[in-house]
Amino acid sequence: MTTNHYPQGTIEILKYESQILKDNPLGDTHIRDLIVYLPPGYDQTDKPYPAVYCLTGFTGRGKMLLNDAAFTPNMAERMDKLIAAGTIKPMIVVMPDCFTYYGGSQYINSTATGNYEDYLIDEIVQFVDENFRTMADRNSRAVMGKSSGGYGALIMGMRHADVFGLICSTSGDAYFEHCYLPDIPKAVRSINGDPKGFMQKFWDEEKKRKDDFPAVNMIGMSACYSPNGTDFDMPFDLATGEIRNDVWSRWLEHDPVRLVEKHAETLKSLRLLYLDAGTRDEFGLDLGARILAKKLRGLEIPYIHEEFDDGHMNIAYRYNRSLELIAQKIVC
């Protein structure tokens, strides 16, 4: 909790019952918390507001953006402070929950996890527009996120620019060779030939081992990028770690670096496309962002690319920069 005092916005915590996620293959709940931040003064006027959707990283869900920390503002406190300072315009912030048993959905549809892309686009956006005073237009609707949330934001910009006209990706997954392949040796040792058995044990044991997270990451991504019916294929041999090129090629079909050319015209229609990453990112996502920026430049797609001196963790302060750029470009 901060010691500063600013006019405070309001937090709405709603239970949304999804028809799209009902009967999902993992049996994950289809009734989920939807967190919505309403700016100070929302109840005193009848005017509509632009909306920003903030997507959390892998193993995250919307309510985590409201965590209380001694020296780091949560999303509501951050918005209050930025609005009070005049750095950003008053905006609604939507924080959805797209968590799964395997750790996350990458905000895409998969037969192994559920249709989280459809959930976000076809249900949540419509629900928010119907229940809050939003400016229901792509040019007044932004999406931002960090890590897997940044990846989700990029996918929204490529496939759903009719819904989101402004995209901000902080350390978003891109150039999969750098961000995923280094995890394979650790994942092989932890999984020990049995991905589903490993996940059951991981859930059963409250104390988590740091060395197990690469395995969770590879399993979660496999469920998103290489589903096989309600099951999934791992992109490596479970005994040796040797790359399975047939599966790995399916992963690469989801890599933003590979998707840019296909969606070039759509990306050119955006009001804002922003990429940033720390120059000490532990997953090489600063290099992925550079490669992605080079692709964008070659296709004459307008973008902003920035780097900062930090790693991948504890960089919530970078939300300030995304929000600042969104406020400059969004239609109010």
Image (cartoon, rainbow, N blue to C red):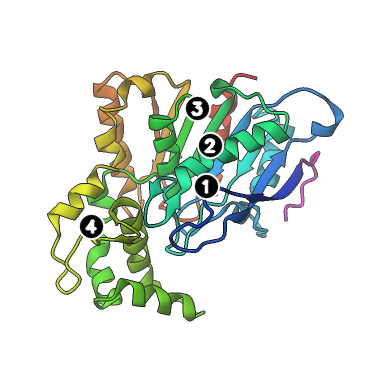
Tell which tag, 2 or 3, sits nearer the viewer.
2
Task: Give, as a three-letter code, the residue at label 3.
Answer: Leu
Q: Amino acid at mark 1?
A: Ile
Q: Who comes first in sequence, dot 4 or dot 3? A: 3
Q: Which residue is mark 4?
A: 181
**Separation of residues labelled 1 and 3 (CA atoms):** 25 Å
Q: Please identify, in this view, whether the residue under mark 4 or under mark 1 is nearer the observer.
A: 1
Callout 2 amino acid: Asp
Residue wearing tag 3: 166
Relative to 321, residue 252 above or below: below
For the point 39% across and 37% down, the residue is: 155
Q: Tell me the SS state at disc 1.
A: loop
Q: Quadrant of the C terminus?
A: top right
Q: Between disc 2 and disc 3, whose residue precedes?
A: 2
- Which stretch did the figure color magenta? 1-9
Q: Residue at x 33, y 47 (%)?
A: 285
In the rendering, at what x and y percent does residue 97 appear? 56, 52
The answer for how far apart the CA atoms under marks 4 and 1 are is 32 Å
As drawn, the label of residue 122 is 2
Looking at the rendered structure, which numbered label has been put on residue 291? none
**Residue at the spot 64% in from the left edge and 27% down from the top edge:** 50
Name the magenta segment's main secondary structure. Answer: loop
Left or right: where 237 falls relative to 114? left
Q: CA distance from mark 2 to mark 3?
A: 18 Å
The answer to which of marks 4 and 2 sits earlier in the sequence is: 2
Q: Which quadrant is the N terminus positioned in?
A: bottom right
- Residue at which label 1 appears: 20
Marks 1 and 2, how far apart in space? Answer: 9 Å
47 above or below 246?
Answer: above
